[in-house]
Image (cartoon, rainbow, N blue to C red):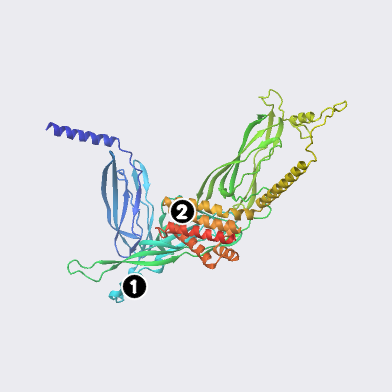
Amino acid sequence: MNRFVARRLAGLLCCLFATLGAPAAERPVFELSTPLTVAAGTAFSVEFSLNAKPDDDSFRAPSFEGFDVLAGPAVSRGSNISFVNGQMSKSVRYTYTFVLLPREAGNVTIGAAAIAVDGQTLHSQPQPVEVVDEGAQGGAAAQRPQAGGERPTEAADRVAEDDVLLRAVVSKRTVFKNEPLHVTYKLYTRVPFVDYSFEAAPAFNGFWAQDLVQKRNNVQSGRETYNGKVYETYVLGDWLLYPQQAGSLAIEPMGMTIVAQVVVQSRNRDPFFGGGHEVYNVPRKVRSQPMTITVKPLPAGAPADFGGAVGDFRLEAVMPDARLAANSGATYTVRISGTGNLTFVQAPTLTLPTSFEQYNVRTTESINATAAGITGYRQFEYPFIARAEGEYEVAPVRFSYFDPTRMQYRTLETKPLALEILPDAKGGGASDAVVLPGRGLSKEEVKLLGEDIRFIKMGAARLRPQQTPLLFSGAYWGLLGLLGLLFAGLYAALRRRILESQNLVLVRGRRANKVALQRFRAARRYMELQERHAFYEEMLRALWGYMSDKFNIPVANLTKENVREELHKRGISAEESQRFTAIITRCDEAQYAPAATSSMHEVYASGVELLSEIEAKIKR
């Protein structure tokens, strides 16, 4: 008996300590649950749920305009206690249920309810409900006789043309060059669905695209009213586009197949249990509407230092100390922040005195892509060393951009910087790097000039015969000729190297295969790690990048038609051109497919083999 009591006490103590060590309750959430569509004259239930204990008598129901309240509120309470790894978690849920009867057909919104938790008032979100008159919509179909083989047809007839829609929503139709444009592809559905697959991915020729869906962990869903009907919406694609050229740019539509699920009343009645239901899968092909974006060129009269920045920016500078010792280093820092095409912003020009040594600019950035545009900053650090003592004036750093809201160019600049360079403290006196006025020579160079002049030695020359000198001998001339040939060869090779390096088209064409191989290696690593999205994205970069470098076609103008024309000009067969198009299409489709629709090994092998064949034929 004593052992039993001891065990009970030990268990109670463990529960007490677990309760005291339990984590804090989750944040209270108050939400409304209601059907999307209801039939006129049919009662339905509405639930308001709260995941915390409410204050007494704090629940306030909405007015329920357009409905008759048949019952409610019915209050129910549920709790759950669980132990995980010795930790206890407890959750509680209060539910307020109403039974409503719609008065007439149409779109009616159930307003927000209110409730208080620990003195804090919470509100639910209003929800639209569509009340349909089933007698008017389905009377003809209900009277039509149905044969046993016509059940799938009856199920398909229940999915109207506008029950499943795919829409492309753009933030604006007219933009300036390099001004951001937000494009969202939404699926609108009034019927449940069990599967979907993409058939055509949108093309953004002429745009630089930033995929915003990759930066979210889940698909955004919601509820909207469109053309007088209530839909469940799902965001399938979300891009931020920056037009790279002026004119009318087309955004190709997105296509997909969605499998809707329809429940049909069964005619095979069971003699004991009555009738049942049959479930049918109805595939529907949907396609978003094509769009044309008008891209206006930037106005004339751009400042000389304008580099293509479009948006709203700020310029800040962190300047070095006004007094520096000679031969000491310092850094001039410039930060450009704001909203716009920050990715394309380059380092402004910092002009330093000629006696200063300036090193490569270091760039750091913090960029966040949102639907409103790219925000953040780019910071540029200009390290330098002051070599000559004296007083110097550093000109302001200027940065110009185009503001599409004000439709004008704006120029920002830092304050001028006055620097006083003191003598080098380590040298104990004036720096040897002081520049002489008007000469451009330092003291070190002056000392070297003094050592170059020697006094002419006087007196008779004391000449002694020596062995045959090398000068003007056969070996001399042979060595001189050999050096001349070597110099000519080195000069020709160096000149050819310089000309080739200046020919950007030739350089890009030669390095195209090397860059493609590097990207193929990266794609293979992603394939081994089973990272599908990263694999297909790297394969697209390898294939498109190779064609862009090899044929000197800008990425913004790169299309499948351009590639086929260039391959045809270089003797590549139409079959191999079609293989390239097929691989690109498979990669595009696989990026947006919910499951593995293509073998990564097969796509990788086909891409490497195709580029190897094209490279071998072009080099002939």
Quickly name the residue at label 2. 535
| In this rendering, the label closer to the viewer, 1 or 2 | 2
- Kindly report the distance in space between the C-alpha atoms of the residues bearing marks 1 and 2: 41 Å
Of the pair 153 and 441, the residue shown nearer to us = 441
Q: What kind of residue is marked 1?
A: Thr
Image label count: 2
Q: Say which residue label 1 marks.
A: 153
Quadrant where the C terminus is found in the figure: bottom right
Classify mark 2: helix, strand or loop: helix
Residue plotted at (69% across, 47% down):
490
Task: Answer with the quarter of the image where residue 262 lies.
Answer: bottom left
Q: Position of residue 453 (x, y in %)?
A: 81, 30
Residue 3 is labelled as none
Vertical relation: 198 (above or below) 122: below
Q: Are there few (<14), some (14-19), or many (20+) residues within 10 Å of tag 1?
A: few
Q: Position of residue 437 (x, y in %)?
A: 78, 33
Residue at position x 75%, y 45% in the image: 481
Q: Earlier in the sequence, mark 1 or mark 2?
A: 1
Q: Is residue 180 left or right of residue 426?
A: left
Task: Identify the residue at horizontal 30%, vertical 35% (top origin).
Answer: 21
Secondary element under disc 1, as helix, strand or loop, is helix
Q: Residue 48: x, y in percent?
A: 32, 52
Question: Which quadrant of the view contains residue 245?
Answer: bottom right
* Picture coordinates of residue 317, whole percent (x, y): 61, 38
State left or right for residue 265 relative to residue 447. Answer: left
Q: Is residue 104 visible?
A: no
Quarter of the image holding residue 457?
top right
Can residue 296 be seen in this snapshot? yes
* Front position in the image: 51 or 483: 483
- Residue at the image point whose x is 19% and y is 33% from the top: 9
